[in-house]
Image (cartoon, rainbow, N blue to C red):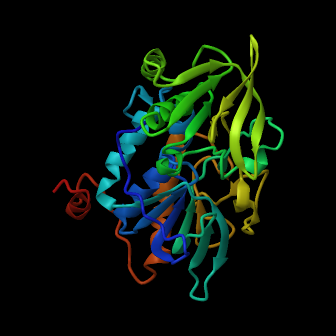
Amino acid sequence: MSDTNPATAADDETGAPIETDALIIGAGPVGLFAVFELGLVDIKAHVIDILDKVGGQCAELYPEKPIYDIPALPEVSGQQLTDRLMEQIKPFGATFHLGHRVDALSREVDGRFRLVTDRGQVFVAKVVVVAAGGGSFTPKRPPLEGIEAYEGTSVFYSVRRMKDFADQDVLIVGGGDSALDWTLNLQPIARSLTLLHRRDDFRGAPHSVEKMRGLVTSEAIRLMIGQATALKGAGGALEAVVVKTKDGEEQIACTRMLPFFGLTMKLGPIAEWGLNLDENLIPVDTARFETSIPGIFAIGDINTYPGKLKLILSGFHEAALMSQAAHKIVYPDKKLLFQYTTSSSSLQKKLGVR
């Protein structure tokens, strides 16, 4: 997990609106750099992401996989890139709303956008920046009959609040970084914790695997090799999971289950916003990176235009041009003077280096 902790909001789930200049949807590298570029032109931003941590695909799917095409960084991991971007945007004080998905978008009478998340939080923004990669991440559901009845009460695909797992009998299923990270983080507060994986070989970071095996040796957690085949319980309250092992069948008593079977990417509710779409991508112009709806911009892998390359560095370029266009909407009566960070004392002051 990242050592860089973003400023996250204690969201008012009663729906009290949060007003902001810009709302960025997506906290991957391109969304994070958009905070920087918008900040340079005095546009304050809030950032929403459906995941429970920043970094998007980089941090979630390959946190330790090296990336070789970031300018001036011959080699950097997805997590390292996320951490460096978080450090870079610190001067601009963006607020992050993690574990949210934007479900609805509409226009206010004054021209601003009203957005509502799946948790009931309302945002009112002058501009919206969609930096959602290939769309929203959707957890892969295990092929277990009747699992839908337990979702949100006993079965969870992410950890939004650790207290929901305190003093519970927790079963974590998976062998990647997410499964290992939450095994290590929840073990101290869970009543009991079992890690279930189909084989005794793990894809996660070696130091996490080593820590997990240490907890197994000390009997602080239980490791089972096998596959879940059925759920037991009534009224959404999980009581046990049936597991098939090489020796037969066994039931694991548990009150909470966290399956980490990976993620699929879908455009999700964005498809219902009235934007022109091209095969689940959002067409934009290459001067402003604005969509078919004025005031809504799309940058990164979610957009399309002639010659588009799905590279992080392309998204950085798009964020820079988007911010110039967004300034005209946020400050319609204010002329924007183009400046360089190397020579502008005002920009250096914003960055805290002068």
Would you place residue 298 above or below residue 124 in this image? above
In the displayed structure, does residue 309 sit left or right of residue 89?
A: right
In the displayed structure, does residue 277 sit left or right of residue 300?
A: right
The N terminus, quarter of image: top left
In the displayed structure, does residue 68 sit left or right of residue 271?
A: left
Report the residue at 64% width, 39% height from top.
257
Furthest residue toward right: 145
Q: Is residue 316 visible?
A: no
Q: Position of residue 315 (x, y in %)?
A: 53, 48
The C terminus, quarter of image: bottom left
Between 155 and 342, the one nearer to me in the picture: 155
Tell me where residue 13 sits by quadrant. Answer: bottom right
Q: Position of residue 244 (x, y in %)?
A: 76, 20
Tell me where residue 293 sits by quadrant. Answer: bottom right
Furthest residue toward left: 354
Furthest residue toward top: 247
Between 338 and 232, the one nearer to me in the picture: 232
Q: Position of residue 200 (x, y in %)?
A: 61, 13
Would you place residue 7 above or below residue 245 in this image? below
Between 8 and 304, the one nearer to me in the picture: 8
Between 187 and 23, the one nearer to me in the picture: 187
Report the residue at 47% width, 17% height from top.
213
Q: Is residue 87 visible?
A: yes
Report the residue at 36% width, 41% height from top.
84
Q: Position of residue 126 (x, y in %)?
A: 51, 76
